[in-house]
Image (cartoon, rainbow, N blue to C red):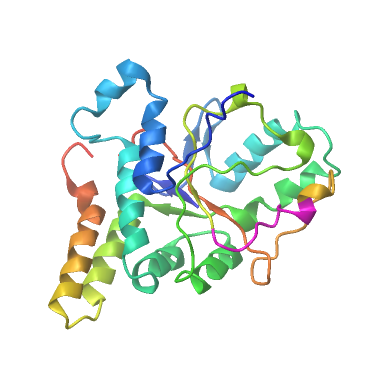
Amino acid sequence: MPEDRTRIENPSAFGRLANSLSWEGIDGLRKFRQGGVGRSDVFQAEVLHALDMLPRQAFLGMLLERAHGADAARAAAAAQVEQATLDLSVHEIFLTPAARAEPSAVSSSPTPCWSLPTRSPYSSSAQSDRGRFRRPSWPSSARPPCCVPTAARRCC
Amino acid sequence: MIFLAAPPPVPISEHGWLYLNQAATLGLRGVLVGVDGLDDPEQLVEWVPETVAWITWPAVVDVVRRSAQAYPSADATARGTVDRLTVAGDLLKRPNR
């Protein structure tokens, strides 16, 4: 049974960051000697960890309101922001059972995800029905995972 | 939700400057070409505008700063907790960030 190198046992922001750094290699790790200044993965972990701990409605809720695009999804996320679990670890989301990625194809720079405690529109029955999707319906019972990909290796 | 250094459009390798929905559609179509068993891959492409959101890091800092200033708490310990946690939102202000 091959080791699942994408699995993160510690889903905290620091666990996710440690996992991300583990893919850097010896030479890559040297770039973090100043505490990760200028590194978007370190910055993301710091900021998103703080947002996780701060009063949700006043901070994360306001951030969701200030964002752009996917209006219904953001409104649904904001409506349950107090109960949400801010999960920075990587979860594979399968389009279909046939679309499962082989470990060799997994990105060496895993994407952190925000996932909400409710089920994904692509989960359970949608997955068992090969080749079929359920249309997302953000304001109702099926709510999306909110993914937060790193847009650039260096954030600024 | 995608966190950006600056508002779209964003530079996409070999495609110039694109808005996020254009960029996501471009990448998604490329991925779906290699996926077997999808009845209608274009469904996923159609859902891109409903699923892709963005915010800039400067906007995040601004939200955190404004929210901290407006947060009502007369309790010194709770106030201190909010103030300490919001320090993370000021990291963009550091040189070389």
The answer to which image quadrant residue A136 occupies is bottom right
Left/right placement of residue B70 relative to residue A137 reads left
Indicate whether B76 appears above or below B9. below
Which quadrant is the C terminus of chain B positioned in? top left
Query: Is residue A155 visible to us here?
Result: no
Q: Main secondary structure of the magenta part?
A: loop
* In magenta segment, residue A117: yes
Indicate whether B1 appears above or below A6. below
Q: Residue at x 53, y 64 (%)?
A: A74
Furthest residue in direction top, as rendered: A27
Q: Residue at x 49, y 65 (%)?
A: A84
Q: Nearer the viewer, residue B45 or A93?
A: A93
Residue A11 at x, y percent in the picture = 44, 47
Q: Nearer the viewer, residue A85 or A67?
A: A85
Left/right placement of residue A7 relative to residue B49 reads left
Indicate whether A147 appears above or below A103. below
Query: Is residue A142 visible to us here?
Result: yes
The answer to which image quadrant residue B50 occupies is bottom right
- Which region of the structure is painted magenta? A116-126
Residue A130 at x, y percent in the picture = 84, 44
Residue B11 at x, y percent in the picture = 47, 35
Furthest residue in direction front, as rendered: A1
* In magenta segment, residue A43: no
Q: Residue at x 45, y 68 (%)?
A: A65
Left/right placement of residue A18 relative to residue A78 reads left
Q: Nearer the viewer, residue A8 or A94?
A: A8
